[in-house]
Image (tube, coloured by chain):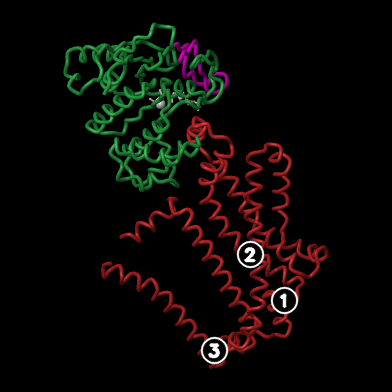
Amino acid sequence: MTTRSAMRQLTDIAYPALVFIVSIVVWEFGARAGWFPPYVLPAPSSIVARIGDTADLMLHHAVVTSFEIILGFVLAVIIGVALAAMIVFVRTIDKAFYPWLVVVQVIPKVALGPLLVVWLGFGFLPKVLLAFLLSFFPVMISAMVGLRSIDNDSMFLLRSMGADPIKIFRHLQLPSALPGIFGSMKVAITLATVGAIVGEFIGANEGLGYVLVTANGVLDTTLIFVALTWISVLALVFYGAIAMLENMSVHWHVSHRSRAAQALA
Amino acid sequence: MTVQRESAPTPAGTDNQIEVKGLNKRFGAGDGVVALENVDLTVRRGEFVAILGPSGCGKSTLLMITAGLTPPSSGSVVVDGKKVTRPLTEVGIVFQRDLLFDWRTVLGNVMLQADIRGLDRNASREKALQLLETVGLRGFADRRPWELSGGMRQRVALCRALLHDASLLLLDEPFGALDAITRDQINLDLQKIWLATGCTAVMVTHSISEAIFLADRVVVMSPRPGRIAQDVTIDLPRPRTVEMRDTPRFAAYQATLRDAIMH
Ligand SMILES: Nc1ncnc2c1ncn2[C@@H]1O[C@H](COP(=O)(O)OP(=O)(O)OP(=O)(O)O)[C@@H](O)[C@H]1O
Ligand SMILES: [Mg+2]
């Protein structure tokens, strides 16, 4: 590695870190100087202290919310891709269901939250369902587009090898749809997080959304920030996991090549 | 190398692999494009036929219809005595575009043929590596298609078409992106493979000398709508050598075909 690229790697980390540190310092200083009251914006030091104090309890809530997000998201990916495949392969399903899926998509799913609570109670299920409902559509649409966008010649190539529809799906359609599906999964994981948190807002007795609502009720701004920190960390971890999975499975795609080439340079 | 098949002396009409009769192809309804008009073409088993013709005259369309991948508007194609109504599978095709999959390595792309057909993986792998060796790409087996030049990609596509020893090869301008020297070498290799396997080959090309060098017969198509304008039998001994190109007979064929294309 040359000194110049080492320098660049250093600044890649140093610059954003510098921005972060300066903001925190200004924030801390402002809080101590009394620029704003603590119930509006608590000092970073008190938030950090509180994170430490509440770690055990918050970990429990974070685990609950994580399960809701992961389950909703995984369902969204599986059902989204499966439904897309069915719509692409079976014309009747395409005709009968697709218009309704679009109609359902137009309804703001968050508005269904109260209904889900009425139907399914205050437990795990309505949150998972909300996370699923919010995140499944983008996955289905990208999977559909990907499975359909196969050029004629590639299809001819496989037919001349005697491929049946299942082999065409496995060796041609799915691999070409994969980059798009991964792109939509990054959107979907964010939406699933929104779904789970909103579900907890509406009615829950555990989870990070529940912590937010109760902290809000007693004007415990510091606790709100603690919960927000946990949520942000979760979101980052999930996003990172998907990005990693993407790197592993579609490294061959155009969108990943320049980075691979850079890494070699 | 055996040269027994020199001039393949099968009596006409008894052993035809391809019989195209009264073939018409029109794209689009009403006043759409007429790509092929009343094409008749017979290819004997084991024969090497080259198709020459201006761009857009329907050469690719003719190959696709022969392979059962595109339906004709009227007329019929009979392959191995059976009317073609669905995609042929006893065939190796090199399409005009190389159609390599980015999610497979170079070797993986050749192996696609084996994976889809369910051929024995180990034996196929050996064969694939051998073919890549023949076209000078053994060292690129583990690379990705996008790391290859256009000519290298075409050679990979050729290996893929040859992997399963098909009895019929349909080649659509397989060497268009190759430099003259590589092209000569590949032409020699293709002749060797064709002589060794005894397969039938139909190859579209824009190069008159490539057509003469490889083919038993050169078919010249007219500008759109494509019709068969001339059918020239190339009576040169096998195996053909690069030096034969400097002979007066080769030059005479060249002149004949150039004339045919001009008209
Ligand atoms: N799928 C299609 N839809 C509509 N028109 C088509 C289609 N495929 C081919 N054509 C038309 O049919 C004609 C013949 O096309 P074809 O690809 O067979 O030509 P070609 O002889 O192979 O040309 P080239 O040497 O440039 O490859 C062209 O005019 C083209 O516009
Ligand atoms: Mg063509």
Q: Colour of chain B?
A: green
How far across and down, in percent of the image, does residue A33 sit? 53, 93
Mark 1 element type? loop
Q: Residue at x 74, y 68 (%)?
A: A124
x and y percentages locating residue A84 in the rendered image? 63, 46
Marks 3 and 2 on same chain: yes
Look at label 1 and name its amino acid. Answer: Glu
Foreground pick, A81 / B123: B123
Residue A45: mark in rendering: 3
Q: Residue furthest right?
A: A118
* Residue type pointed to by label 3: Ser
- Disc 3, SS: helix
Q: Are marks 3 and 1 on the same chain?
A: yes
Label the magenta part by its dominant secondary structure: strand
Mark 2 Cα shell of 10 Å, populated few (<14), some (14-19), many (≥20): some
Query: A109 and A27: which one is in front?
Result: A109
Using the numbered discs, state the Cα–Cα distance from disc 1 to disc 2 in whole angstroms: 16 Å
Which quarter shows the N terminus of chain A?
bottom left
The subunit carrying tag 1 is A
| Residue indicated by mark 2 | A70
Chain bearing tag 3 is A
Q: Judging from the image, what is the letter of the chain drawn in red?
A: A
Query: Residue at (43%, 7%) from the top-left corner?
Result: B13
Q: Which residue is mark 1?
A: A206
Is residue B25 magenta-colored?
Answer: yes
In the image, the segment drawn in magenta is: B18-40
Residue A216 percent across, percent down from the top left:
70, 81
